Amino acid sequence: MDAISPASIHIYQGFGQTAFYNLQNIDRFFVHQSSKYQSCIDACNDCAESCELCATSCLREQDVKMLERCIQLDRDCASVCWTASQLMSRDSEFIKQICNTCAELCDACAVECEKHQNMEHCKLCAQACRKCAEECRNMAS
């Protein structure tokens, strides 16, 4: 058994309870759990960031009305990507369902962004969405 150093003990106090956690063991558990999802988590996080940037950049364009659907899909896609990343990080039983939904939304966002290839932010967003959709489909299968 590994020796437990005082620095590895975390004390949580709340709601009238005190809990002691050995952070060395917790770290090993989370590293093991998330490693099987890591490439998909990374793709989801990258996609969410690209979608957030794309939506913000679209709002700064002259013809915002023309980009209304792009902005909405960017926001929806980012939200689902962040959620998928979180569920994978906690090894949720709903990973396949959220990854299927994420892939579907990423595809829709990519199709819309590809309509605006003259805007660099849409081009980059479409690429990130395609990669994320592929990773999520692989995770869901």
Image: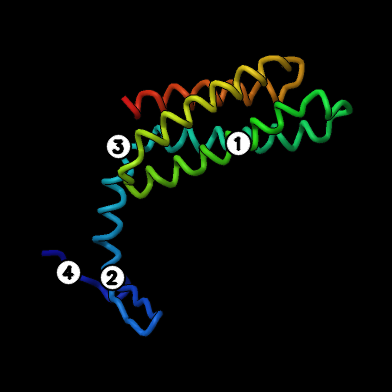
Residue that label 1 marks? 76
Which residue position is annotated with label 4?
A: 3
Q: Residue at x 63, y 26 (%)?
A: 125
Q: Is residue 5 above or below residue 53?
A: below
Q: Amino acid at mark 4?
A: Ala
Badge 4: few (under 14), some or many (20 or more) residues near its Cα, within 10 Å? few
Comparing labels 3 and 4, the label whose residue is closer to the camera: 3
Q: Residues within 10 Å of mark 2 (few under 14, many from 20)?
A: few
Gap between marks 3 and 1 measured at Cα: 26 Å
Q: Residue at x 60, y 36 (%)?
A: 76
Q: Secondary structure at mark 4?
A: loop
Sequence-earlier tag: 3 or 2: 2
Q: SS class of the residue under badge 2?
A: strand
Graded by Cα atoms within 10 Å as few (under 14), some (14 to 19) or many (20 or more), the crowding at tag 3 reads some
| Label 4 close to label 2 by CB (< 8 Å) | no
User: Residue 3 appears in which quarter of the rendering?
Assistant: bottom left
Residue at x 30%, y 43% (from the top left corner)? 93
First reached walking from the N terminus: tag 4 or tag 2: 4
Q: Earlier in the sequence, mark 1 or mark 2?
A: 2
Identify whether 21 is placed above or below 95: below
In the rendering, which numbered label is found on residue 36?
Answer: 3
39 sits to left or right of 104: left
Residue at image point 69% right, 23% down: 122
Q: Amino acid at mark 3?
A: Lys
> Mark 4 and mark 2: span between their CA atoms?
14 Å
Instruction: Give the labeled residue for mark 2.
Output: 21
Q: Earlier in the sequence, mark 1 or mark 4?
A: 4
**Mark 3 → mark 2, Cα distance in angstroms:** 24 Å
- In the picture, the disc for residue 54 is none
Instruction: State if disc 2 and disc 1 touch (CB < 8 Å).
Output: no
